[in-house]
Image (tube, rainbow, N blue to C red):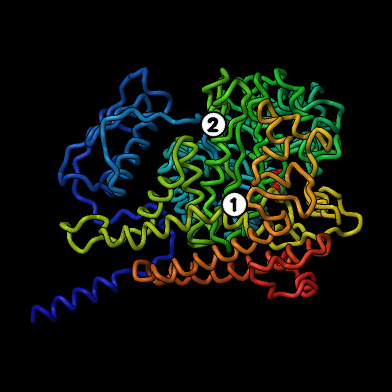
Amino acid sequence: MIKILITYLFIFATLSVRAEDGHKLWLRNSNPKPVNAVCTNSSPMLTIAIQELQQGWQGEANALVSLKIIHNKDIFRDGFKMTKNKIQANTEVGILYGVYELLRRQQTGEEIKEAIVNSSYERRILNHWDNIDGSIERGYAGLSIFWKKGKDSLVVTEKDKVLWKEYARANASIGINGAVLNNVNASPLMLSKAYLERVKSIAEVLRPYGIKTYLSVKFSSPSLMGGLKTSDPLSPEVIKWWNDKTREIYGLIPDFGGFLVKASSEGQPGPQDYGRTHADGANMLADALQPYGGIVMWRAFVYSATDKDRAKQAFLEFKPLDGQFRDNVIIQVKNGPVDFQPREPFSPLFGAMKKTTVMPELQITQEYLGQSTHLVFLSTMWEEFLKSDTYQEGAGSTIARCTDGSIFPQKYSAIAGVANIGLDMNWCGHPFAQSNWYAFGRLAWNNQLTSDQIADEWIKLTFHQSALNANQPRFSEDWKMNFLKPVSKMMLQSREAAVNYMMPLGFHHLFSATEHYGPGPWWAPKGMRKDWTPPYYHKADSAGVGFDRTKTGSNAVSQYHEPLLSQLNDVRTCPEIYLLWFHHLPWDYKMKSGKTLWDEIGAHYDNGVKQVREFQKVWDKVQPYVDNERFVQVQEKLHQQSENAQIWKDACLQYFQKFSRKPFPIDIQGPVNDLDELIKEDLGKH
Ligand code: GCW
């Protein structure tokens, strides 16, 4: 009888690995223990803090937990002091963050000792590229959670509010405290009364979670919306228009964060249309926002043809303006000098703008990294970026330190990530894409965190199965060995794998068409801007391959600080991961491995394909530990990723072979796809 019962229990335990639609993200509070939470003050935000404790408490049953607003000068901004059962902060939002940290530590089994925890950046912001018709630029997880099409598009429903609340909670749980609600390619309608009313409703839901609302604005709004003859930033009527509009916005949303602006970039209007500089444009908006404490995030993603090398253009335009911006202007700079490629060296603007606040812009949505089909954990890419040494103020001037206020005196500090969130049930399309949202928040909070710590936390929070009885350890040794470890290893390798099968050794922008998904090193339609086509970037010819950005080439290296400049300039010291970014080299150039460049390129593509096949094996083995729904979803996506990786390899190697005229490297698997077929089918347009 007992045996039958045990068997029954065992079956039950196995079945209890329930189906999961992924909607709960990393917030899967299960079986909370009773807790007695008391707080000195009361407010909607503190009520949330208490509710969270009650819903997620995993500490001692019936513990007394005290939440207290204090004045402690070692706690900055929204930081907090934490012990096992006490959270103190100078602000309400500090208390909320302390609660989430305490719960996370309980849920992941991390040690909880007395500590003051402060954030690296003051502003930790998601940029949504959501259009007001509900579509999302570079969105791969369904339509917008904020905007929709149709005649009822501005009606705020209960369903909307529930979703916004879930969104706000997820963000707050990882410390994100700002959201830009619309695409940087902004519609002027965004600033109309009707849309601003909806923004107000969204802001009301986000506010108790400590999230400020921001908007992207179109620079020519005064003419397009206001009917003015010009949008010249120095024109008094334009200045007045923005002042009035800003006042109107703050009337609706008193804690409004400010504007994000894409100006004089990719066809968007900007101050240059009126013969003015970026500083003129940004300062005019900054002055309008200043009385209310708002900021302007002005993007440096510009590449008008001021130089033959697109990678140099943002620096050429912005560096001379250093010192000319108001102190509530932040220049938002993409991590790399070109555009969110699988791997780029950092943008030389970091550390070089010494009198201007600069914030990194990272891309969480995987525009160039397999979108919502490929499993790519971006944390390692961001960690590599944040730890890069600019040498601008001596060795150790990492990007993290140049941007978080450690090196330069600056009024604000900020970091942004382009969101990967949509209406899909699991928010991000790929179950593992949630880890990138999570990682962005965690790194924005603490830019010194390591990716293995982040992966470890995320896996524990996302895939933890509740124990059958309270005496079982939260994570069994078996689970850690056979699930946590292999899955974490797979995540940590995944970005390098993508670099290998897409564009290793400094290759960049080898995408077909403008979808930025599949390979197209050949793609160069007549009449297309050259710097939108792959041949511009790889420059393959019979002599070799790569973009010569050395002193004798485009001289992009000169935008970096010594000793990095010389290191990148010299082919013998340039890190091989950036080799073809900075050098044009013969196909039989000798690599550190002893292989020729051609063979080494082949080895990387081949390795990338093998790595993904390895991921498939890892995932197949962890089946007993995952609910069926997520298991199958990831399995199918890995299958597609594996096929795609093969296509990338076959396409790129066979294409470059036409220039190298060398045999396929003998120690790698030969192509299985025909190049002409691949060109015809064009995975880019998937
Ligand atoms: O990465 C590129 C994208 C565009 C995007 C642009 C930008 C919002 O391909 O879709 O537009 O960058 O960052 O402004």
- Residue 658, horizontal then vertical, whole percent: 83, 64
- Residue 590, horizontal then vertical, whole percent: 71, 50
Q: Is mark 1 on a helix, strand or loop?
A: loop
Observer-nearest of 229 and 278: 278
Label 2: how many Cα within 10 Å (few below 14, some 14–19, many 20+): many
Among numbered discs 2 and 1, the one appearing first in the sequence: 1
> Residue farthest to the right?
527
Looking at the rendered structure, the number of numbered marks drawn on it comes to 2
| Quadrant in the rendering for residue 218 | top right
- Residue 154, horizontal then vertical, whole percent: 60, 51
Q: Residue flagged by tag 2: what amino acid is it?
A: Ala
Question: Relative to 490, does residue 295 appear above or below in the rendering?
Answer: above
Label 1: how many Cα within 10 Å (few below 14, some 14–19, many 20+): many
Observer-nearest of 283 and 240: 283
Tag nearer the camera, 2 or 1: 2
For the point 65% across and 56% down, the residue is 135
Q: What element carries label 2?
A: helix
Q: Specify the quadrant that holds the N terminus.
A: bottom left
Ligand 1 within 8 angstroms of badge 1 C-beta: no
Left or right of 118? Residue 347 is right
> Residue farthest to the front?
594
- Residue 427, horizontal then vertical, whole percent: 51, 57
For the point 61% across and 58% down, the residue is 371
Q: Is residue 152 visible?
A: no
Observer-nearest of 460 and 580: 580
For the point 66% across and 35% down, the residue is 333
Residue wearing tag 1: 365
Residue wearing tag 2: 400
Per the model, the C-alpha gap separating discs 2 and 1 is 21 Å
Q: Specify the quadrant that holds the C terminus.
A: bottom right
